[in-house]
C-alpha cells in the first residue's frame, strides 16, 4: 500500500511539473499571443493635421479587429530637426524603448519616416526585421528602394500634378496661374512636373514662386490680374528658412483673394483652399489595412505588391465654392463637399420635438399660475413692496424729481426738489407746479405743450439759469417725460439736474483750448483728437491748412489712414496699437502723409491717451504733428551719399559682384552666423575656360560682356544669401552655407546652366573647384584648397567640377 501511494505521489509531481512548464511556454510563445503590437511611425509632430487624421482612422479600423491591437505612436518631427544629428539619438530612443517589447508590424507615414527606416533600420536592433507597411508616400524613388526590401510594402500616394491641373481648369476659368512651392526634395520634384504640364499650355500665363517668403508672395498676388488662380504644391519652409505649419499656411491663405487649388488636402479641410484632387486619408488607410489583413491571413509580404494607383476624389471646400461663385454642375461626379454649414433643422432636429413638448408643459404651468388667486395676491403684495422701495430709492437720488398729474398738481416729489419750491407751496395735491416754483423764470421751461414733444413722446431737454429759494444761481438741465398707460396720459415726470459745475468746467476748458490753439498756430504745430470708440477725428484749422484738405475730407480715422504712405502704414498701426495697450499711452512716430496736391510730406507726431473708461480701456487720444519734410530730405541725402561711397568701395563695377574688400567686410559675420546655427560653409572657385583666347580674339570689350552675362547666370542659379565675389580677372568666388554634397549638386547645375546658353554669341564653359571651410582654420587655407581643386578640374579637360576635401 505504501509503495502504491509513493508511486501515485511521484506521478502527481511529474504531471504538475509538466503543467507549469507548459504554462511558461505558452506565456512566452508568440503562437499563443492573443493581441497585436503595432508601431506607428509618423514623419511629423502629433499636432500636424494629417497626423491627427491618420491616427483617428487607425484607431477606428483597429477597433474592429477581433484581437486587441496595442498601438505605439512615435513622431520623427522631421521638419524641425537636422537628421544628421537627430537620427542617431532617435535610434537610441527606439532601441531602449522597444528592446523588451515584441512588435508585430510597423506602419509608417509620409516620406521622411520611410526614408528613415530605409537608412537606419539596420541600427534598430530587435525591430530591424519586422514587416513594414508604408502610406502617404509621394516620392517615387523611396517607393522604388522600398520595393527592393524583402519585408516592405505599402501604398503610393501619387500626387498627380497633371490630373490636378486638368481638374483645376475644369472648375475655374483661369488665365493666369501662380505656382507656389518650396525647395524641399518633394517640392522641387513636384515643381519640375508642374513645369512640364504648364509648358504645353500656350494660352495660360504661369509665374513660379519657388521658396519665396510669404510677404513677397502677398505683394505679387495683390497685383494679380483678373482670372488669376493659385496652384499651391508645397510650402513647408521658404528661402529664409522660415518654417510654416499647415495651420499657419491656412491663416495666410485666408487673406488671399484668389481661388487656391492645392495638393495639400488639409488646407481644404481647414478652409483656406478651394479644392484638391488626391486620394483621401480614408482611402489610404483602407489600402494599408487591406495589406495588413493579407499578411495576417498568412500571405508572404514579399509577394504583396505595392499599391500604386489609388482612386482619387476632388475634395471641395463649400464656403470657397460659394465665395468664388462656382456652380456645382462644373464639379466631377466623384467630388466630395466639405465644411458645409448645418441648417437650423439639421443642427437641432434631435431637440425640436422635446423642445415643443417642454414649451407645451411650460405653457400649462404658466396658465395654472395665472389662474391661481393666491399667487396673484402675493404678486400684489410684492408690487406694493417694490413701490415702497422705489419711493425710498427716489429720496436717495441727488437729482430733483417731481411727478404731476394732467392738471398740473404735484403728486410726488423727492427731498432734492424742495430746494426749487417756494416757501408757501402748500400741501402736495393742493398746489399746482407753476404756482410752487420759487424762480418765476423757470415756469416757461416747464410748460407741457404738445409742440415741445419729440417723436417718441418725450419733451425736449432744456438748459437754463435758475435762482433757488436761497437766492443762489444754478445751471439746470430739465428732462420731462409723459407717463402713460393703454388709455392715455396719466401725468408727467420732471427731472432737474444741477449742472453748474459742469458748465463752469466746460467754459474753463474752452478757454484753455483757445489758448492752446493760439500757441500751436504760432508754432506751426497741428493738433488732433481721436475718439477711439467711434473713430471720429477732429483737427484744428492749422492741421487742415497744412494738409490742404477741408473738414469734410478728414473727419474720421479711416480717412486719415488712407492718406498715410503705404510703406508707413504698418509702422503706424503697430506703434499706435502698442501705445493704446500701454498704461502710459504715449505714441511717437515719423511718417509720410499725402497732401491735397498729391505730394507727400514728412511729419513727426506725438500723442497721449487722455481719457479711459472704468475698465482702463482708452477712449480718447489727443496729439500734435508738425512738418519735418526739409529735415528728412537732408537726412536722406546724407544717407544716400554714405551708401554710395560704401557701394563703390565694395562692389565690382563690371559684374555687380562683391570685390575682395566687400568679402572682407562680410566674412566675419558669415563665419559667426554659421557657427551659431551649426551650418557648414562650402567654397566654390571657378573661372572661364580659355578666357584669354576670347580677349585676344574678340577684344576686351567682348570679354567684359561675357563676364557680365556670366555673373547674371550665376545669380539666377545661386541662393539669395550666398556670397558672390569677383576674385580677379575671370576668376570668381562663391561662398554658401551648405554641406559639401549640396555644394557638389549646385556646382554641376551651375556648370550645366553656363554650358547650355550663349554668351555674346559664344559657347562658354567653366571649371569649378570646391572645398569646405574647417572650423578654426584661416579662411585663406580653404580658398587654397578650392584653388587646388580648380587646378584638378582644368587638368581633367576643363568644363568639370572637382572637390578638395582636406
Image (cartoon, grey):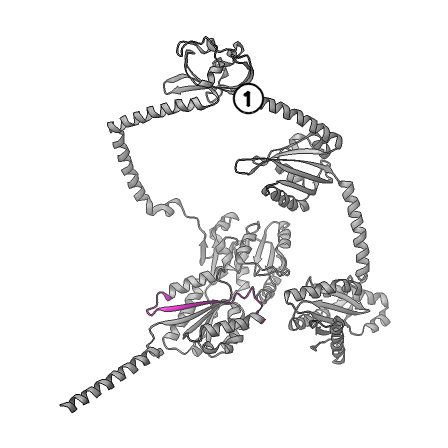
Residue 648, horizontal then vertical, whole percent: 82, 58
Q: Is residue 401 visible?
A: no
Q: Is residue 476 left or right of residue 755?
A: left
**Going 50% across and 16% down the picture, which residue do you hit?**
452
> Which quarter shows the N terminus?
bottom left
Q: Is residue 417 visible?
A: yes
Segment tinted magenta in the rendering: 62-84
> Which quarter shows the C terminus?
bottom right
Q: Is residue 274 left or right of residue 773?
A: left
Residue 302, horizontal then vertical, whole percent: 44, 79
Quadrant hosting residue 713: bottom right
Say if 763 sits above or below 646 in the image: below
**Going 64% across and 65% down the picture, which residue do you hit?**
677
Say if 779 sits above or below 415 in the image: below
Q: Residue furthest bottom?
A: 3
Element on which disc 1 rests:
loop
Residue 591, horizontal then vertical, whole percent: 70, 43
Residue at image mark 1: 499
Quadrant hosting residue 673: bottom right
Residue 799 versus residue 621: which sits nearer the camera? 621
Residue 616 versus residue 376: which sits nearer the camera? 616
Amino acid at each position: 500500500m505504501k509503495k502504491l501511494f509513493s508511486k501515485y505521489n511521484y506521478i502527481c509531481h511529474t504531471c504538475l511539473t509538466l503543467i507549469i512548464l507548459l504554462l511558461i511556454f505558452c506565456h512566452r510563445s508568440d503562437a499563443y499571443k492573443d493581441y497585436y503590437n503595432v508601431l506607428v511611425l509618423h514623419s511629423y509632430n502629433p499636432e500636424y493635421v494629417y497626423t491627427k487624421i491618420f491616427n483617428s482612422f487607425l484607431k477606428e479600423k483597429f477597433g474592429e479587429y477581433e484581437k486587441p491591437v496595442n498601438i505605439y505612436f512615435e513622431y520623427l518631427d522631421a521638419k524641425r530637426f537636422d537628421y544628421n544629428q537627430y537620427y542617431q539619438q532617435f535610434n537610441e530612443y527606439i532601441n531602449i524603448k522597444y528592446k523588451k517589447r515584441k512588435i508585430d508590424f510597423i506602419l509608417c507615414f509620409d516620406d521622411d519616416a520611410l526614408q528613415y527606416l530605409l537608412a537606419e533600420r539596420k541600427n534598430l536592433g530587435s525591430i530591424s526585421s519586422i514587416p513594414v507597411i508604408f502610406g502617404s508616400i509621394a516620392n517615387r524613388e523611396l517607393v522604388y528602394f522600398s520595393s527592393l526590401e524583402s519585408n516592405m510594402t505599402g501604398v503610393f500616394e501619387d500626387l498627380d500634378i497633371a490630373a490636378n491641373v486638368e481638374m483645376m481648369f475644369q472648375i475655374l476659368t483661369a488665365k493666369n496661374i501662380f505656382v507656389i512651392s518650396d525647395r524641399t526634395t518633394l517640392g522641387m520634384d513636384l515643381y519640375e512636373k508642374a513645369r512640364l504640364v504648364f509648358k504645353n499650355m500656350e494660352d495660360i500665363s504661369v509665374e513660379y514662386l519657388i521658396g519665396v517668403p510669404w510677404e513677397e508672395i502677398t505683394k505679387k498676388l495683390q497685383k494679380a490680374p483678373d482670372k488669376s488662380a493659385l496652384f499651391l504644391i508645397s510650402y513647408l519652409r521658404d528661402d529664409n528658412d522660415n518654417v510654416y505649419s499647415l495651420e499657419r499656411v491656412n491663416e495666410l491663405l485666408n487673406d488671399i483673394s484668389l481661388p487656391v487649388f492645392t495638393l495639400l488636402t488639409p488646407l481644404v479641410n481647414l478652409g483656406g483652399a478651394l479644392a484638391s484632387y488626391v486620394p483621401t486619408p480614408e482611402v489610404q488607410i483602407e489600402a494599408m489595412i487591406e495589406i495588413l489583413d493579407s499578411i495576417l491571413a498568412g500571405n508572404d509580404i514579399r509577394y504583396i505588391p505595392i499599391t500604386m494607383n489609388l482612386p482619387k476624389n476632388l475634395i471641395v471646400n463649400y464656403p470657397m465654392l460659394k465665395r468664388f461663385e462656382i456652380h456645382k454642375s462644373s464639379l466631377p461626379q466623384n467630388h466630395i463637399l466639405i465644411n458645409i454649414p448645418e441648417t437650423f433643422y439639421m443642427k437641432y432636429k434631435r431637440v425640436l420635438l422635446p423642445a415643443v413638448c417642454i414649451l407645451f408643459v411650460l405653457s400649462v404651468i404658466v396658465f395654472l399660475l395665472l389662474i391661481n388667486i393666491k399667487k396673484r395676491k402675493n404678486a400684489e403684495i410684492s408690487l406694493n413692496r417694490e413701490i415702497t422701495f422705489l419711493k425710498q430709492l427716489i429720496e436717495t437720488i441727488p437729482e430733483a424729481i417731481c411727478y404731476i398729474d394732467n392738471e398740473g398738481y404735484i403728486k410726488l416729489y423727492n427731498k432734492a426738489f424742495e430746494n426749487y419750491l417756494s416757501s408757501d407751496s402748500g400741501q402736495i395735491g393742493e398746489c399746482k407746479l407753476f404756482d410752487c416754483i420759487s424762480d418765476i423764470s423757470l415756469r416757461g421751461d416747464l410748460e407741457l405743450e404738445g409742440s415741445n414733444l419729440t417723436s417718441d413722446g418725450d419733451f425736449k431737454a432744456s438748459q437754463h439759469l435758475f435762482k433757488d429759494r436761497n437766492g443762489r444761481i444754478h445751471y439746470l438741465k430739465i428732462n420731462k417725460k409723459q407717463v402713460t398707460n393703454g388709455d392715455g396720459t396719466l401725468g408727467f415726470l420732471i427731472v432737474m439736474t444741477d449742472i453748474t459745475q459742469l458748465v463752469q468746467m466746460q467754459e474753463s476748458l474752452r478757454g484753455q483750448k483757445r489758448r492752446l490753439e493760439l500757441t500751436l498756430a504760432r508754432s506751426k504745430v497741428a493738433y488732433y483728437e481721436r475718439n477711439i470708440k467711434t473713430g471720429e477725428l477732429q483737427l484744428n484749422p492749422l492741421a487742415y491748412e497744412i494738409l490742404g484738405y477741408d473738414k469734410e475730407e478728414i473727419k474720421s480715422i479711416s480717412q486719415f489712414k488712407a492718406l498715410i504712405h503705404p510703406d508707413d502704414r504698418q509702422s503706424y498701426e503697430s506703434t499706435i496699437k502698442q501705445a493704446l495697450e500701454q498704461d502710459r499711452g504715449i505714441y511717437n512716430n515719423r511718417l509720410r502723409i499725402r497732401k491735397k496736391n498729391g505730394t507727400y510730406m514728412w511729419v513727426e507726431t506725438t500723442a497721449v491717451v487722455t481719457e479711459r473708461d472704468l475698465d482702463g480701456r482708452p477712449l480718447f487720444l489727443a496729439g500734435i504733428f508738425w512738418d519735418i519734410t526739409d529735415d528728412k530730405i537732408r537726412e536722406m541725402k546724407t544717407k544716400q551719399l554714405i551708401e554710395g561711397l560704401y557701394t563703390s568701395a565694395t562692389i565690382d563695377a563690371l559684374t555687380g559682384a562683391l570685390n575682395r574688400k566687400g568679402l572682407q567686410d562680410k566674412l566675419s559675420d558669415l563665419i559667426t552666423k554659421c557657427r551659431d546655427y551649426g551650418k557648414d560653409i562650402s567654397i566654390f572657385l571657378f573661372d572661364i575656360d580659355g578666357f584669354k583666347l576670347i580677349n585676344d580674339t574678340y577684344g576686351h570689350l567682348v570679354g567684359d560682356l561675357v563676364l557680365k552675362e556670366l555673373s547674371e547666370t550665376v545669380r539666377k542659379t545661386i541662393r539669395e544669401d550666398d556670397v558672390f565675389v569677383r576674385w580677379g580677372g575671370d576668376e570668381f568666388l562663391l561662398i554658401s552655407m551648405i554641406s559639401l554634397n549640396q555644394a557638389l549638386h549646385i556646382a554641376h547645375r551651375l556648370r550645366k546652366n553656363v554650358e547650355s546658353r550663349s554668351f555674346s554669341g559664344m559657347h562658354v564653359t567653366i571649371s569649378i573647384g570646391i572645398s569646405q571651410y574647417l572650423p578654426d582654420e584661416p579662411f585663406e587655407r580653404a580658398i587654397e584648397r578650392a584653388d587646388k581643386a580648380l587646378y584638378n578640374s582644368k587638368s581633367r579637360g576643363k568644363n568639370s567640377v572637382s572637390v578638395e576635401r582636406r
